Amino acid sequence: MASNSGNNKDNSYFSNVLLNATSSGFVKLGLSALFLAVIGLISYSLTDASAGGMFIIAAAMIGGYMALNIGANDVANNVGPAVGSKVLTMAGALIIAAVFEAAGALIAGGEVVNTISKGIIDPTAIPSVEQFIYVMMAALLAAGLWINAATWFGAPVSTTHSIVGGVLGSGIAAAGVATVNWPTMGAISASWVISPLMGGVIAALFLWFIKGAILYRVDRVSAAKTWLPVLLGVMGAAFAGYLSVKGLQRIWQPGIGMVAIISVLALALVYLATKPMIARASRKIENTKKDVNKLFAIPLIFAAALLSFAHGANDVANAVGPLAAIVSAVSGDAVSAKVTLPLWVMAIGAVGLSVGLLLYGPKLIKTVGHEITRLNPSRAFCVALAAAITVIAASWMGLPVSSTHTAVGGVFGVGFLREYFANRRMHMIGPLFIWAETQADPRGKKIRKKRAAKGKRKLVRRGYLMTIVTAWVVTVPVSAFVSAMIYLILLNLV
């Protein structure tokens, strides 16, 4: 016991040191400025002092700023549920996410990126190389500014939609509306609705199953021994497919058949590996919801790490894709939709994601994990599982989805399902107590109606729902408008 107490004190001390070191606004601002200054010096050492070199230096610093903001905002979706369910401390979540985000970006970020973000504009329609550079710089800066503002307001937004809006706005300003691929933009707009709905419904369905098959059973421990290995096998299959489709897509692109085979093998292996482990762990717990929920803790940590790896691999391009396009345009005096990604450019994105997360990530992690609805390990497990399954299903259907919208939609889904169950119990049991309490009062009928109306519980904070949905809806238009303004300023001043 003394040893465990000492370890807990050490962990608490380490957590406090990490969080206190990044709690001061001035310290965070200073460290951010230092990071951008280092980027400027590195890019200066790799380029000459010509006008083109100065473009690269400026773009590198803007790309670093964008990476900081992606880390501050977007990564919260991967680890927020684990923190909210108290499976991970804030410090532990920051460390896991920072390591796996950077690893995903560097290992699986890919050597070639699509710089025009989902092909929404035709790069050859931009009149000149110089204007193309302005388009990319404006898009990066506008997206970074919008994500920064959203983080300040506490709204998790899609960084992909932010950069799409940036490219759209500056692209239209440079070459007109004819350059836009409107069917692609329509599909992206549809994902505003598709992503959160799919994530919410899938997360709610898994939670409904877990409640019915495990948590509401008389013998919860036996039910967990039977069904939890199956759920972990599904999680293994989902994440194997998720990494194949999303996380590793820039270095390996398997067909649907191969992804299916990988997922089935993962399901079988995880099921066989975890069944004896769950049986051993079940012998050490009581037959309570709280103890059974503990069995979801370690799988949830793995889920947070895998989501962070896949996010780093996929979304790092939102920070460094336009930067790579500028480097290519300056170096080769040509415009291309796909360019080679230099290692130093990828490093800016990878390190920037982690630095932004460590400095500014806790605010959005608290929003996703604590402030929308109350999470425990089984609910958080459902959110992580829904995020992976939604991305795979949408990819197979050819639908562009946002990982941010999907994860946050999952949090709302489990919250509204909790609310439904709580109010259903209140509807069945509550009126009996209200009736008994008010029988002796001549105004009993009025009191009963009033109390019955007040008895409806709201376990999802509506204020956050409206803030987040509003931020999602305006992301592309706001990023586009700001980007167009920045482009026009650059065109007339530079």
Image (cartoon, helix red, strand yellow):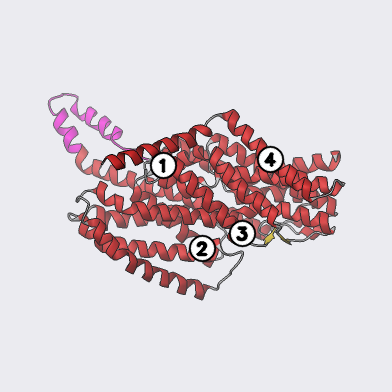
Amino acid of disc 4: Leu
- Label 3 and label 2: CA atoms lie apart by 12 Å
- Label 2 and label 4: CA atoms lie apart by 31 Å
Location of mark 2 (residue): 243
Location of mark 4 (residue): 36
What is the secondary structure assignment of the residue under circle 1?
loop
- Label 3 and label 1: CA atoms lie apart by 28 Å
Residue 49 position, x and y percent, is 85, 45
Location of mark 1 (residue): 89
Q: Earlier in the sequence, mark 1 or mark 2?
A: 1
Residue 454 position, x and y percent, is 30, 32
Location of mark 3 (residue): 109
Residue 447 located within the stretch drawn in magenta = yes
Q: Earlier in the sequence, mark 2 or mark 4?
A: 4
Q: Residue at x 43, y 51 (%)?
A: 410
Q: Is residue 43 visible?
A: yes
Q: Earlier in the sequence, mark 3 or mark 1?
A: 1
| Placement of 114 over or under 139, stated as above or below | below
Which is more toward the observer, 96 or 491?
96
Q: Earlier in the sequence, mark 3 or mark 2?
A: 3
From the viewer's perspective, is 290 left or right of 380?
A: left
> In the image as oriented, which residue stretches furthest toward the front?
3
Graded by Cα atoms within 10 Å as few (under 14), some (14 to 19) or many (20 or more), the crowding at tag 2 reads many
**Which residues are drawn in magenta?**
431-459
From the viewer's perspective, is 331 left or right of 161?
A: right
Residue 230 position, x and y percent, is 32, 64
Residue 237 located within the stretch drawn in magenta = no
Q: Is residue 198 visible?
A: no
| Placement of 476 over or under 110, stated as above or below | above
Q: Quadrant of the N terminus?
A: top left
Q: Quadrant of the C terminus?
A: top right
